Each structure stands twice: as C-alpha cells, then as structure tokens.
Amino acid sequence: MAEYKWPPAEKRSLIGKRIPRIDGPAKSSGRAKYTYDLNRPGMLHAKLAFSPYAHAKVTGIDTSVAEKMSGVKAVQIIFPVGTEVHWAGQEIVAVAAETEEQARDAARAVRIQYDVMAHMVSDVPPDRAGANIVNSGEVKEGDPAKAFQEADIVHEGYYGNTQVVHCCLEPHGQVAEWQGDKLTVWASTQNVSGIGGEFAKSLTAKGIPVDVANVVIICQMMGGGFGAKFAADPWGVACAQLAKTTGRPVKLMLERDQELMEAGSRPTLYARVKIAGKKDGTLTAWQSDAWGTSGPQAQSPLNLPYLFRFPNRIANFTAVLTNTGPTRAWRAPNAPQQCYVTMCPFDDLAAKVPMDPVEMYRKNFPILGPRVKEYAEQLTIASGLMDWKSKWHPRGDTRPGSIKRGVGVALHTWGGGGRSSTCQVRINPDGSVEVSLGSQDLGTGNRTVIGIVAAETLGLPLEMVHVNIGDSRYPPSGSSGGSTTVGSVSSSTRVTATDALNQLFAKLAPVLGVTADRLEATDSRVQVINDSSKGLDWKQACAKLGGTSIIATNQMSRDIISAGVGGVQMAEVSVDIETGVIRVDKMVAVQDCGLVINMTTAESQVYGALIFGINYSLYEEKIMDQQTGRHLNPNMEFYKLAGMNDIGELVVHMMTGPGYDERGPIGLGEPPTVSPGPALSNAVANAIGVRVPELPMTPDRVLAALGKA
Amino acid sequence: MENFEYAHPAKLKDAIAMLGANWSDAAVLAGGTDLLSLMKDYVEKPKRVVNVKGIGELEGIHTGKQGIMIGALVSVEELRTNSSIAKDFPSLVQAAAGIASAQIRTMGTVAGDLCQRPRCWYFRNGFGLLAQDADGKSLVPGGENKYHAILGNDGPAYFVSPSSLAPALIALGANGTITGPSGSREIPLANFFLIPKSASEREHALKPNEILTRITIPAASQGLHNATYEIRQREMLDWPLATASVSFRLDGSTIRSPRIILGHVAPIPWSATAAETLIAGHSLSEELSEQVGEAAVRGARPLSQNKFKVQLARVAVKRALLAALIQGA
Ligand SMILES: Cc1cc2nc3c(=O)[nH]c(=O)nc-3n(C[C@H](O)[C@H](O)[C@H](O)COP(=O)(O)OP(=O)(O)OC[C@H]3O[C@@H](n4cnc5c(N)ncnc54)[C@H](O)[C@@H]3O)c2cc1C
Ligand code: SF4
C-alpha cells in the first residue's frame, strides 16, 4: 500500500528538484490567455464612472445622455443616489457598449451629482486627525517603566511605512456570460472556488436569482493578486448584471488608474518607539505609540513589537480613518510594516550598544519566538552568502567619497500551512492521469507543484500528468491567501493520488500474484517492491483497468503538512550622500518552507518577494492630495516600480534537508516579503550613519535624514 | 480620448495650413509618445490631429557650414547614436541616453521632446496647466510638490520643464527654426521656452499654427567642453529630479564662455547666469565647481516638499562641470 507520508529524499525523483513551470512555454509565447485577453463571441465592453470626490453623498445620477450614445447597450447603477462615497475613484455606474472606446466615452457622459463632504486623505498622526481616530487601547506586560529606568541603553525613534498599493500588472476584472440561468465568470481571482457563492448571493439580492450551483468561475492564468483579489467586488457583480440585461457576454476590467485608486492598498503603520537593553545587547523593554490607516474602515490593532517577546512592554495603537480608498490584504498582511517598526529600532539600539546586529539577534534568541533554531542556521548561512563579517562596519561608512556602502539584516516569520483542498485524481485505462482541483495559479507555479506531487506519487514523469485547475467545477480548494496554497494542494494531491494508486494496486495485485501492499509505482512502472522484474509498465498496468477509470476524490490531510516558517535577509546598498539616491548592490534571502516541492518556483517566489521589497522600500508611494482628495499618481509613471537595473544581485537560499523536509510543505508566497524593508533600511543606516525613518527611502527622505534638505 | 479628425500631410506647407488659430483646433503629432497619453487622459482634446511623420523635409541630421542641423523628426535614439554628435556633443548624448526607455527613444522625436507638455501631476490629472482650483489659486504650493519647481516659481506656473534635451541644446547655443503660414524664423532655443502667465498660454514660443522644424547647433559650438549630469532615482523609465548641462571653452586651463543650464527645476530650462559669471576666467577645481553649484541655486525658493531639489541641482552642476572638464582633455 502506498502511504500518504512524503517519500524520503533518496526516493524523490521530482519533489525538491528544479523543474520549469509547465505553463512556461504558453506564457512566454503569448499563448496563455489571461482574463484580460479573453474575448467571447458577441462580447460587450464595460467601463466605470467613478467619484472624483474623496467624500461625498451621491445626490443625482443622470444616465440619459450616456444611454443614447452610439454603441451603448446598458447602464448599471452600482451605488445609487443616497450612497456616501468614501474615496475618490469609487465606482458609481457601469456602462456596457459595443467597443471599449464607446463604453469609456459613455461612462464619462454619465452625470453624477454629489454633495461634497469634508475629507481627509493625509496620513497624519492621531493628534492631527481630529475625530477620525479609533484608539484600541494599551497592552502592558511586566514593568516597562522600571525596566527603562534600569536599562543600560535606551533608544527612541520614529519609524513609518507610507501607503503602497498592490499594483497587479493584470488589473481586477472579469468577463461574465449567461446561458439561461447559468452564469460563467472568467475572473482574475485568487479565489476560484469561493467567489461563485458571492456572485450568487449578491445577484440574488439585486433581483437576479441565481443558485450557486449555476455559477461557474474560471481563472486559468493570472497577472498577480497579492491579496487584493479575493472578492467578487461590486464591479464584478455589475458586470454580471450588465451581461444579464443585455443578454451578451460583458468584459469589465479596471483601468490602470482605477486599479491603483481603489483596488487595493496596504495599511500604513507609523510608530514612536522606545527600546531598551543591557550593555551586552540583551533586550529588556519596549514601548510603542503606533498609528496607521487602512482607509475609511478602522484598522484592527497591530500588535507590536513583531516577533520579539519583551519581558517588559507597553504598546498602543490608534487607527486613523481616511478617505484614501480601502485597504486589502497585502502579501503577508501587516507583517512587513510590523517587522519594519521593530527591526529598525532593534538595529538602532544595536548601533548604540554598539554591537553587530547579527550577534545581537543571537543574544536575544530566548525572546525571539519559536523559530530560533532556524534563525541560528539561517543567520550563519546568510552571513556567509553576504560575506557579512567583512562587509559590516559600525554605523556610518567612513571611507572618503560621496558613495557610502552598508549592510543590514532583518528576520521574519509567517504561518502558512494549509487551508482546505479537495482533489480528484483520475487514472484512465490508456495510462493518462488527470488531477483536478478548484485551485488557482496566481503566477506562483501552483499548477506545476500539483503536477509534481501527482507525478511523484504515481512514479510518473511530469508530462504524464494533466493538471486541471482554475475552474470552480473541479473539487473546491481554498483561496490563495496566507501562503496556504501549496500546503493545501500538495497535501490533497498527495492523499488523493495515493488513494488512486492504491485502487490501481488492488486491481493489479491478483495479476501480479502478490498482495497490494507489496506493490510500488516507480519509473513509470508498477512493480513488486524489491523485485523489479515482477511488474508492468504504467501503460500496461492501466490497460488492466479494462473500460473503467479509477476516480479518487479526497481532502487534504494536515498530518503531512505543517505551518510556521522563518527567514533571514541581508541587504547591501550604496548610497550617494550628495543626491540621496540608493542603489541596491545585493540582497540575500535565506528561507525555509518545510519540504520544497519545486526548487525553481520556490526560489522564484523569493526573488519576486525581494523585488517587491525593493519596490516598497525605495520607490512605491501612493501620493494623496489633501486639497482635492485625489490620488495624484494612479499610473505607472509616478507610482514607481523598479526596473531591471534597479534590482541588484539577488541571492536566494532555501533551507532543505533534515529539520526542514520532515515538516512537509508549507506555503511561501508571503514570508520573504516581510524582511526587505528593515534589511534595506538598516543597510542604509549602516552606510550613511543615520536612520531614514520612513519608507520609501526616496532621495528627499534620505537627504532630509542627512540634514541636507 | 475624444474623437478627432486625422490628417497625414506629406508637405510641411500643407501641415501648417491644417493647423488652427487656437491650440484646441489642431495638434501636431510626431512620435505620439506624449500627445497620445495626453489625449487618452482627456488633458488635450484637439479637434484635428496632424501627423507630421510623413514629411520628409523634417527628417535627418545634416552637417553643413552653419553647423549640425537636426530635423524635427529625428528620433531621440537617432540623436543618441549619431556619430558626429557623439564626437562633439557628449552632453547631448548623455541627455538623450537618460530619456525613458529604448521604445520611447525610438518613437519620440527631438521636436516632440522639446514641445512635450509638463508632467505636473495636477496638470495630468485634469487640473489645468497652472493647477488652479475653482478660485484660481494654485494647488501646488500647498499640495504635493516634491517634483515641482524650485526656481522661476513666482507663479502662477510651478511645473518643471520636462525636456532633457533642451538644457543640453541651450548650453550648446542651439537655435530653433519655427515655420508658420508666413515663413520661417530662427530663434535661440534659449528664447523658445516661456513661463506661461495664464492657462491658455503654452510653455514655448510657438503659435498654434507653427511647427518647430529644425534645431541647429552652430558650427562655432564645436570644440566646446560639454556634459550633462542627471540625477534620477531609478535607472529606467524615470524622470530626472534635476539635471545640469554645461559647456565652456578651455583656454589653457581657463574657462571661457561658460553656459550652465539646469533642467527639471524650473518651468523653463534654467540659465544659471550668476554661476556662469563666477566661473568665467577661472580654472576649474573641485572647490570652485562646488561654489558654482552653490551659486546656481542661490535664488532658489523651494516649495514645502522640494528643498531636496536645491541640493540635487547644486550637485548636478558640480558634477556636470567636472565631467565636462575631463571630457576631451
Ligand atoms: C516614462 C517616460 C519617461 C520619459 N522620460 C523622459 C526624460 O527623462 N527626459 C525627457 O526629456 N523626456 C522624457 N520622456 C518624454 C519623451 O522624450 C517624449 O514623450 C518624446 O520625446 C516626445 O516626442 P514625440 O515625437 O513622441 O512627441 P509627440 O507626443 O508626438 O508630441 C509631443 C508634443 O509636442 C508637440 N509637437 C511634436 N512635434 C512638434 C513639432 N515639430 N512642432 C511643434 N509641436 C510639436 C505635439 O503637438 C505635442 O504637444 C519620457 C516619456 C515617458 C513616457
Ligand atoms: S511598458 Fe510597454 S511593453 Fe511594458 S508592459 Fe507597458 S505596454 Fe507592455
């Protein structure tokens, strides 16, 4: 009998190897069709009319002109008269027309009246936010007052993360099509199995009764989600309404400006921090007054510090309400911000001790949470890859010239694990294998991971397995969030492929004259364990199924996966102290995620996360204008992202082998996004001798920190 | 974008006849890398678009007695890779090399670069060239102004001149040829750029029915030491935060006829005359170049968020001067 547990290292032929993603050729040749690329026969295009005001009440909507314009087929009011609008860019009306241009012109011709209300879009501290604050109170442990008094070294500082957006290269949107009372939605979504219910519920509430069983969600290729694409969204429901009204398929994708204005941003987090320790670097006390905004809704309190369990701590958090557009889960929700406002003051205290921060992390292992065993190894490996010992110097590069170099370090943790997943594995008499799950590949390599697990389990090469995902008609899988996808799908695929294989063994046992528990599948053969001469090749074996396929369906098992990862990152930068321009020379990321299924796509996740980190640390900034309430840079020109030359050398090291593999797969999408901010900021401080307190570290901020602006 | 009438004349004369008395009547389309974005964002809504790309007489780089003549349609990439320009005017090559990406450099033209509209985000978001609120008050001084002007910003214009080529060309003493219904005139490029006083004015000396047809770098500019130094945050697809283009003649080690033109710091390419005076007749040292940088920004009046640009302009001048000194030495 084949077992669920993962094969030992020497028995793995695919798991943990470097395997190119199976949809790579389709993607790189342009054959892969993303939602944005889909054009259904007779399809209409829809565009949105949205509020130019950050805070207003809708007092009138006149669509009469738009309705008469050429090509216009239907108009859908999304938020009716009486709605209070909370950010500039909030959609009010959708218009469907024969062409994209006609829809755009018509959306502009919709006349919407507003009662303009006072707005606040500046991300200000609570004392300047008037009534727009919600204080979540104070958390206190130990005796912080006494601990600060008795401390050898105390550091106080201010640290801030300004607002960044998800900026998915493929914006939100979908194509909706009805056939009678059946709805198909091709959506750019992280939640193939989940949003059908949301569509059914919203549409039913809006007078289009539809049963969830009649809603099909399809997402084969996706241009990024990063936490912003879990919902059906009002524009998605409006798209389906327009399709119903017109009896034609409708495509509604957000334009770049709408995507940046409202389809997702990250909560801000600012803090005044006081941190204390002993002469030997042992941390003793923490105090933080933190605030941040997640837009119009109050943000849930953010716990500080990140990771460290200080014996003495006092922390409070105030949510500031603003009209900046809603936040959405952003790759490791809140952890990058929390890590930043923790690891930067930590590094500042280390500079004051003075002590190499790597040593000071080690010194504080007793209060550094459950992953210290991993950190101990990872710090050593990262130091080697960065050549930390020779590159680190006390704060401030004293060598002459305007270019200063420095290195920084930070570390992080994340949960991951599994959410839910059901898989179906079908072994056909012709030897073909199909694996089907209602999961989705956001660009992470999930499709390939599923194929690898199935192929490994069945002893087949990857090409023999056909992976079906991205369709809600397949057995349901959880949404791709919280780094739970690989944990979920690798587990359900392993379990179900094993079940299917055991069914095959049961059929073949009499043929081979042994009991099923003496069979194994390996090298495209089913054979007797320890007697490879007694066996059949895969095709012959499957032929014995006669006319019926094996169909196994089962759920993920938590026994073969786990949760909780650690990572250490180091950054090396060059800073021109005359211009404030920072160049990333090198970043090192050492990361564990349990059993690595595909080394290539695992590393890719980390590379991507480092690039993400360089972006939010140096470039990305949502610029809001308090006078007009508008987002001034909802474009790719001044909402800056790194180009190739801005990225520097990236070195990724995945932890594998004993201590890691036996934990089974754990997700990886989010954790490596957590540390880049503090690692880069600490490197800059190490280079120039002062802290640049806010991200992104733009030249104006760097020069201000240096007293030159 | 709004609907428009499209014209594709083959002759300059015809193109001019198709332009109108007002800016909203017609727009010249060259590479389209700026005009199309402006139209898509409804910032510009010309009734007619006159594509000049088919007009052969606007093409090519020619060397003659007067100097080097650069046709309006010469692409930024053509300019960057031209060997006679590379030999004599590294400053221009450096300015061209910094522009956006290979795609934009290949589509974008020299005249288009000089005539492109400001990137001020209030302007590009539909608040008008002067970014004024309903009462005519500028949104810039009290708003998000970190990329705005630090010089020549007495109002009502606070945007910065976006062209990277302009400061380099002006420092090289280039002239522009403007052709309209009644013929052509040549003016120093330094006089081409104007600070608009009202939202209906443009940032340059063209009338709505005129075309910038040619740029000439006079023969006398050959042998100038010249360089452009740009400060930009990203390596790619990013606008400079400040630039300096300089030129001078070396008489032994003595600097003669210096030109120092700052880019991206004022509504026009900014002539740092006080700095030029300071350096003329001296030999250049690191210290002097620093003082010259200082002099170049002496009159700067930074807005609430752009004090850092004063520092950047200062450094750009210093580094451009030092680069020009080494070049050709
Ligand atoms: C991301 C990005 C980054 C950029 N970075 C830089 C940079 O760093 N430095 C820089 O200098 N530029 C930069 N540019 C701008 C780019 O150089 C210009 O868009 C380009 O040069 C314009 O040329 P074009 O031929 O495409 O002009 P078009 O878009 O065709 O025209 C631009 C304007 O000039 C007018 N016009 C064009 N030709 C004539 C003529 N012969 N006579 C009269 N009017 C005319 C048009 O009517 C229009 O108003 C950047 C652009 C982008 C998109
Ligand atoms: S810059 Fe050009 S090539 Fe690159 S994504 Fe945008 S449109 Fe495509």
Image (spheres, coloured by chain):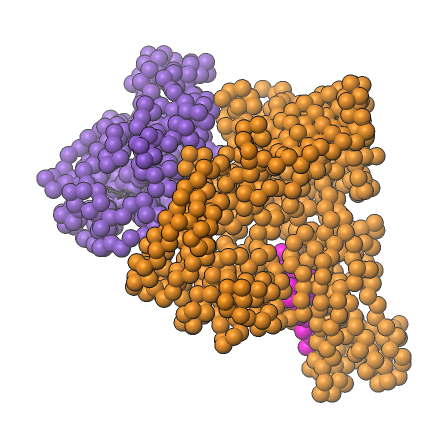
Q: Colour of chain A?
A: orange
Q: Quadrant of residue A514?
A: bottom right
> What is the span of residues highlighted in magenta in the rendered image?
A432-451
Residue at 67% from the left image edge and 45% from the top image edge: A672
In the rendered structure, the answer to whether residue B71 lies left or right of residue B100 reads left
Q: Quadrant of residue B299?
A: top left
Q: Quadrant of residue A467?
A: bottom right
In the rendered structure, the answer to whether residue B221 lies left or right of residue A396 reads left
The front one of B253 and A454 is A454
State yes or no: residue A17 in magenta: no
The front one of B14 and A318 is A318
In the rendered structure, the answer to whether residue A55 lies left or right of residue A529 reads left
Residue at 74% from the left image edge and 87% from the top image edge: A546
Image coordinates of residue A581 in percent, x first then y, are 52, 30
Q: Can residue A317 be seen in this view?
A: yes
State yes or no: residue A433 in magenta: yes
Image coordinates of residue A52 in percent, x first then y, are 40, 45
Image coordinates of residue B278 in percent, x first then y, are 35, 13
Q: Colour of chain B?
A: purple
- In this rendering, the count of numbered labels is 0
The front one of B92 and B98 is B98
Does residue B49 sit above or below A342 in this rendering? below
Residue at 55% from the left image edge and 42% from the top image edge: A295
The front one of A617 and A252 is A252
Q: In the picture, which quadrant includes the N terminus of chain A?
A: bottom right
Residue at 86% from the left image edge and 85% from the top image edge: A510
Q: Can residue A23 be seen in this view?
A: no
Image coordinates of residue A309 in percent, x first then y, are 79, 35
Does residue A140 sit above or below A601 in this rendering? above
